[in-house]
Image (tube, helix red, strand yellow):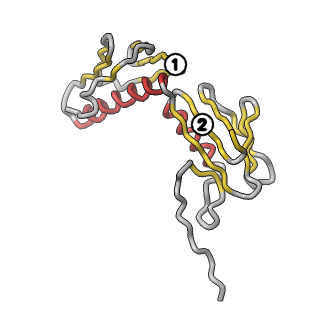
Amino acid sequence: MSRIGANPVLIPENVEVSLDGRVVTVKGPNGEVSQTLPEEISVEIEEDSVRFVRPSDDARDKAMHGLSRSLVANMVEGVTDGFAKSLEIVGVGYRAETRGNTVVLQLGFSHPVEFEIPEGIEVRTPEPTRIEVSGADKQLVGQVAAELRGFRPAEPYKGKGIRYEGEHIRRKAGKTGV
């Protein structure tokens, strides 16, 4: 039995879980999230929990069993507490600014980089060198943070660029004079 998939997902009082075919929808105070689950896993929604049943002990069924449980657990956590990632910008003249539904980044290029914020995600810039990405969908929060970081990842010589908060960048020595 899958250790993760065997545990039921507890549903808080202010959260509503519904099943429509293979699509599980979770509604809560922070919004609504939907996810299509694998075909081989059957979902049983009870009053205060969601249980997952797999058809056999095949390796794929075991993997999908734990995956399905984790996806729904993350959805429930997202609509109740939400998810967040923080990014730091390091470099002289590097800064970020939120304008409406767009993040404008000055990253040392000849032009500013504009990033359109997807629906369901909130991006704040409390300081010019800090970006906070938050939302109810864990996958989308991580994807937006990765895309923002991808515009100028931290480089190993001076450490300039965008990095996750608390991320350690291994530094290289650089050239030595003769």
| Residue drawn where x is 70% and y is 43% of the image | 127
Name which quarter of the figure residue 133 lies in. top right
Tell me where residue 153 appears, x and y as whole percent. Answer: 61, 54
The mark that comes first in sequence, 1 or 2, is 1
The residue carrying mark 1 is 32
SS at mark 2 in the image:
strand
SS at mark 1 in the image:
strand
The total number of labels drawn is 2
Name which quarter of the figure residue 100 lies in. top right
User: Front-most of 30 and 42?
Assistant: 30
Tell me where residue 62 appears, x and y as whole percent. Answer: 25, 33
The residue carrying mark 2 is 133
* Within-10-Å neighbours for mark 2: few <14, some 14–19, many 20+: many
* Within-10-Å neighbours for mark 1: few <14, some 14–19, many 20+: some
Image quadrant for the C terminus?
Answer: bottom right
Looking at the image, residue 169 lies above or below residue 57: below
Tell me where residue 3 appears, x and y as whole percent. Answer: 24, 34
Q: Residue 122 carries which label?
A: none
Tell me where residue 1 appears, x and y as whole percent. Answer: 19, 32
Looking at the image, residue 178 lies above or below residue 174: below
The residue lying furthest to the top in this view is 47
Left or right of 80, for residue 106: right
| Residue drawn where x is 63% and y is 51% of the image | 162
| Residue drawn where x is 65% and y is 55% of the image | 161
Give, as a three-letter code, the residue at label 1: Glu
Left or right of 5, for residue 104: right
The residue lying furthest to the right in this view is 110
User: Front-most of 119 and 131?
Assistant: 131
Looking at the image, residue 14 lies above or below residue 157: above
Foreground tag (1 vs 2): 2
Real-space Cα separation, disc 1 to disc 2, in angstroms: 17 Å
